[in-house]
Image (tube, coloured by chain):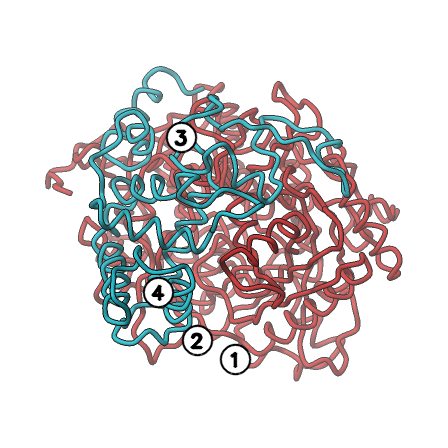
Amino acid sequence: MPGEISRRAVIVSAAIVPVAALTAAAQAPPPSALSASQLRTLAAFVDRIIPKDELSPSASECDVPVYINRTLGDYLAGEKPAFIEGLEATDALARRTHNGGFADLTPAQQDALLTSMEDGSAEGFVNARAFFNRARRLALEGMFGDPYYGGNKNFAGWDLIKYPGPRLATTADDQKMGVEIKPYHHSAYGSADHGH
Amino acid sequence: MEVRTMAINLKPVDVAVVGLGAAGGVAVLPLARAGLKVAGIEAGTWMDPAKDFKPDEIHNNVRGLVTTVPKATKEIPTFRTSPDVKARQAAAHPMMNAVGGTSIHYHAQSWRLKPWDFKSRSETIKRYGASLLPKGSTLEDWPVSYQDLEPYYDTVEHEVGVSGKAGNIQGTLDPAGNVYEGPRQREYPMPPLRTCDFLDHMHKAALSLGWKPFHAPSAINSQPYRGRAACAYHGYCDRGGCHVRAKNSTCFTTIPEAQKTKNLTVIDHAQVTRIVADNNGKVTGVLYIRNGQEYFQPAKVVLVSSYTYENTRLLLLSKSKAYPNGLSNNHGQVGKHYFGHWDAQAGVNVTALFPMDINTWYGAMLSQGVTVDEWADDTFDHSGLGFIGGASLCAFMEKHPIAAASMGTFGRAPAWGSKWKQFVHENANRFTGAYLQTNSFPYENTYLDLDPDVKDPLGDPVCRVTSGPKENETRAAIYAQNKMEEWFRAAGAIEVLKGQPFGPALSTHTYGGTRMGDNPETNVVDRWGFSHEAPNLGMLGGSVFGTSGARNPTLTMQALAWRTAEHLAKNWKSIAG
């Protein structure tokens, strides 16, 4: 059976590979990957993907930008330059087409720009569609991933889609159709409000 | 990585096993029990269930961190669909590195192949004529039959621990199990995993169509087995290790069992780079790197079990005087007869939307599933259909929140904004996918070789995969998707979406490259899994398969691994020389 030596080996290997990078990240968040103005653009972006309404708070109220900023600072550090380029291009698109940065536009103006990015028709923004899809994807990770990583504040994402939450064991009653399964507001890492 | 040029010579062993995953991790047990001294050389190391396995989609699925070292991710094969185009490096490697290998985070489906899978060529010619054989295929009958392999299936099912319900015990059929399976000598060691509302619902729907649904077999404990706990159904089986050791990964089963004999030494963090052969064509051991130091592990016999891509790559990299084109490649067959399973990763997916909450969040992937087998293999008449094979169809439990929120909207809503939120609020708990696995075959123009440009950090070329879509498999996949739609509709689905089959890319279900067969002109290993050219070199894993069946491959890999190891122990003198 695995003994002390192998256990130590896991820890040693973790120091040089990204396997345990997330553990280190949660303990001591790295410096912000995005600038204040980039974060402002990002918040405006994800708040149109997941706006505040009667079903849930907005993405930024659920700390989705916290998740994205944090993952760009550690696990996705290699992707950071491309993502920043996309954010800046989104802002530049807003300034070209309107009088102001993306975050300064009305929701209707923002939606129109995002639609043009989504369908690839945004003028002068070559990678618009790829960036839109990537940013949307990261927004979903932040909204519906474990709060341990910084987003999904108060489990609002899981409540939105009726995911009852991770647990270590379930019964057939937890797998019944046509009934509401009582939510279990808990992170996989224990604390109910991990990361907040 | 800096490597010292002088390898340190180690004490010789009887058998060096390269890779302690699903196949190598099983082979070590019969070897060690027979008293042979075995070095199990593994690139990764041990994982700790309490510490390393979490119900966490970001850790398991988004980041793929259930692994111990990034070996596979630093040698990702390149891929192309045709020899005329340049291969590009794929985004990720489907396998992981640890003691236990990918048997740690797999779905643990534990199927036997069908008798037909071993004789697809001759049976097709007999029933339909040679014209129905897939065009351009290099299909051969296996040199072993289902009957030859049955005792080894039985052994592994009990040693590893498989839950299931027999459908055919020595010719007596039981509709509670799969009546289309080959005859087995006895019942599974454990009953199937528990059923639940949604599975019962799908079961009834299949019965209403006149089909014969059953609960799929899996290497997950449905009840405590040999000191390990029963499944907790927590819903993080996919790409996750089992926190209660109910999934029978080889690091919890056959490897510790082999260690008890004191005949197995596990050498972890050791990356094998070459297999060494002498001028007479016999292998003499393996070179590996551990902590930047190179070692030579002499061995009387070498068994290679490092998954399909690395099995071929290691042989092609191991050039010598006796094997100038790569080890055991004097007939030019290493890398040939490659194929990948046509399944969800190949576009063969079907999703359905139901009018009620189905609560499929928890469970154990396909292992807590219900399967239909009428449309697989040669169970149905293919006259006039234009293809052979088909697919097994499986409805299952387990769904993760990010994946659920990423569901398609069936054209009923946009992909973001308040209308989208309303849609996923109502429907994330009402949709599910199905798993279809199509019988797949090898072709003349599907093969593995070394990439001319892309190298790993050691400077060795990575594996290059050439594998394009095929007409036979496309037709079979579409046929099976229509059957799956029929099943979902019978269960009350209000929307059904079918993927466009485009053919397999890199996956955990790839085969060939060191195919098994009696003819050394078209196969690398003989019917026992030993090289036609290097008599003391054995190959384990999907790389020896000649067909895939409509099944997950692991149990067959393990039965063959056990058989190769047992054959070696029984014929030690003639093989080890």
Identity, as a three-letter code, of the amino acid under mark 3: Val
Local secondary structure at mark 3: strand
Name the residue at the top extreme. A4
Give the x, y percent position of residue B470: 53, 76
Q: Residue A30's quadrant in the figure?
A: top left
Q: Which mark is residue B136?
A: 1
Asked where in the image residue A116 lies, by quadrant, the reply is bottom left
Alpha carbon separation for disc pair 3 and 4 = 50 Å
Task: Quickly name the residue at label 3.
Answer: B38
Q: Quadrant of the C terminus of chain A?
A: top left
| Closer-to-camera residue (B321/B461) | B461
Q: Does B389 sit above or below residue A81?
A: below
Q: Secondary structure at mark 1?
A: loop
Where's the N terminus of chain A, which quadrant? top left
**Could you tell me which chain the residue with mark 4 belongs to?**
A
Q: Say which residue appears at 39% left-offset and 63% top-offset.
A: B335
Disc 1 and disc 4 on one polypeptide chain: no
Q: Amino acid at mark 1?
A: Gly
* Discs 2 and 3 share one subunit: yes
Q: Which mark is residue B445?
A: 2
- Depth check, mark 3 against mark 4: the one in front is 4
Q: Amino acid at mark 2?
A: Asn
Distance, label 2 to label 3, CA atoms, is 38 Å
Q: Which chain is cyan?
A: A
